[in-house]
Structure formats: structure tokens, C-alpha cells
Image (tube, rainbow, N blue to C red):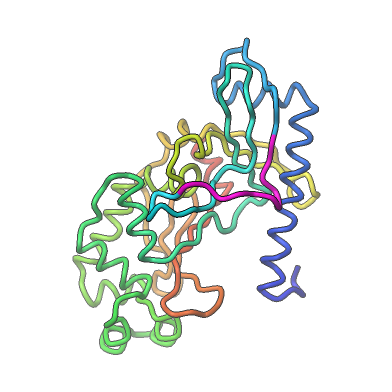
Amino acid sequence: MSDRNRAEGWQHAKLTGHKNEELVAKLTESDVSIQKRLLDCAHIPSNVIISKVEYGGLCESDVDCVLDGGKTKSKTDMWLYLSNGKRLNVSIKKDDGGQVYLISIDRFIRGFEVQFNKKIPNDVKRAISLYFGSAEDTLQIINQFASKNKALETRKHRLVAETLKAYDTALYSALLKWVNDNIGELFDFCFSKGLAKNPSDWADIVWYINLIGENDFDTMINLSELRNKVPTSAEYGTKNGGSTIQLPFGFVQWHSPRKIIPGNIQFHHNYNKILDLID
């Protein structure tokens, strides 16, 4: 993939992801032992069986969103219809890291508040707007308080942690404290709920499996159980003056694939960090 540009890389990831989902769904449909593992992972009684398997793939449809009566992408990639009339939703990850959610700053703030019925404090909103660069005075603050990372911050129109701290220590601390105070909700947002309105569209299991030869793992994780194990250990990264917030299950950073200012909030997952949580 080294000879692909960014756009080609995203397209490759999307297409191979859909192909992997198709193969995983076919495997699940044909292999009773796989079905049992999934049911056991979800703690579903042994007298219940999987009667039908569906997956999104290229024909994935959007679901009801918590915002404005609109639509959004579900975190679920495969649906297992059960003999008891219920459904088990599975999120499939073919890579051990990478983007798990990309969202605009305003949409994240509004969506988080509605999805979790929690008001984000004004000082945290201000810190978010500076760290991810949507505040109108971002460049003014960079010019006054940035040091060795000034060129990066100016280009991306955002403050790194070092500059946020130089500008306002209270905002620097408030943002990190809020992330840790809401680490469970952020985990749910990334892996299970996103902006999907209805619980029937939320993922119950994340399955790290790759059947197209790119990675070698096969790990099923009950998301509600893993959520309870996520520690409040988020911290600012050490590179580029703290351009990321390192999370116990990945990290979050500024990102703008089309070079549009302001950029977006991009959450990444990390398989090895997650393994550390479940071991």
C-alpha cells in the first residue's frame, strides 16, 4: 500500500473491509462452532440458535440518528437473527488499528450530549474548539502562545496540548478530566452506539477477524463487558507537543482528509491496547 495515495488507500480499505465482512458472514452462516462462540460471547442461553445471518457490505443502509431526525452509519456490520426473536449485532474489525470514528466538532458535541443525555460544560466545549481548531480565535492564540509546533498548528488551525496549556492551564486540565470522566461513554460512542438512535442498531460484540490475508487474529469481545474494564487513564500524547489524546483503547486526534479547515475529530482503535484490557 506504500505506492497508494491517501484517497486510494481509503478506497482500498473500504472495499477490502466490505469483502472481509462478506467472508466473515459466510463463515458464520456455515460454521456452527463459530455461531456458538458468538452466542457464548453474548451470554445467550444454549437453547437459542442463530436462524439467519446478514451483513452490510456495499449495500449497507443508514439508520436513524439522534440528531435532527436524520440518518447515520451504524457501528454494526453483521446481524445475527436468533430463534428467540431477538438480534445480535456484531462489529467487525479487519485491522489492528485505524479510524473507528470521524466526525465534525460541532456534530460530536451535539451528538454526544443527545446520545448520552449529558451536558458538556462550556469550558470543555471551549477546550474542544481550540484543541480541534473550530474556535474563531485559534490562529490568534497560536501566534501568541505557540512555540516549536507553531507551523503545524497554523497549518492545521488547531492547538496542541502544549499551547493549550500555555494559553489556559484550566482549559488544558478540564479537557483531559472530561475525557477521563466520560471514558465509558466515549468507548460506547466509538464501538457500539455512534450517533445511532435506536438500541437495536447498536453493536453488542466487536470481532477482530481478517479473512483476506492482511492480519492474523480471531478475537470476539463483549462490548458491554469491555466497557466496564476501560480505565480512566487518558493522557495527552508526547509527540508534536501533544497533538493526540491517548485513550486506553486507542487515541483521538485532529484530522481533515480533504484539508478543510476546521478539521474533524478522528478516533482510532488499537487492538493491542484492547487486549491489555481484557487480559
Residue lying at 54% horizontally and 47% vertically, measured from the top left = 74
Horizontal side of 191 relative to 127 (left or right) equals: right
In this view, the residue in front, 31 or 199, is: 199
Q: Position of residue 185 (x, y in %)?
A: 37, 45
Name the residue at the front extreme: 69
Residue lying at 31% horizontally and 84% vertically, measured from the top left = 142
Q: Position of residue 247 (x, y in %)?
A: 43, 53
Name the residue at the top extreme: 47
| Quarter the N terminus occupies | bottom right
Horizontal side of 261 relative to 33 (left or right) equals: left
205 above or below 106? Answer: above
Q: Position of residue 103 (x, y in %)?
A: 46, 62
258 above or below 42? Answer: below
Quadrant for residue 108, please give it. Answer: bottom left
51 above or below 197? Answer: above
* Magenta span: 54-64
Quadrant for residue 117, please give it. Answer: top left
Q: Position of residue 214 (x, y in %)?
A: 76, 52
Horizontal side of 129 relative to 81 (left or right) equals: left
Query: Magenta stretch containing residue 57, yes or no?
Result: yes
Query: Magenta stretch containing residue 167, yes or no?
Result: no
Residue lying at 72% horizontally and 26% vertically, measured from the top left = 34
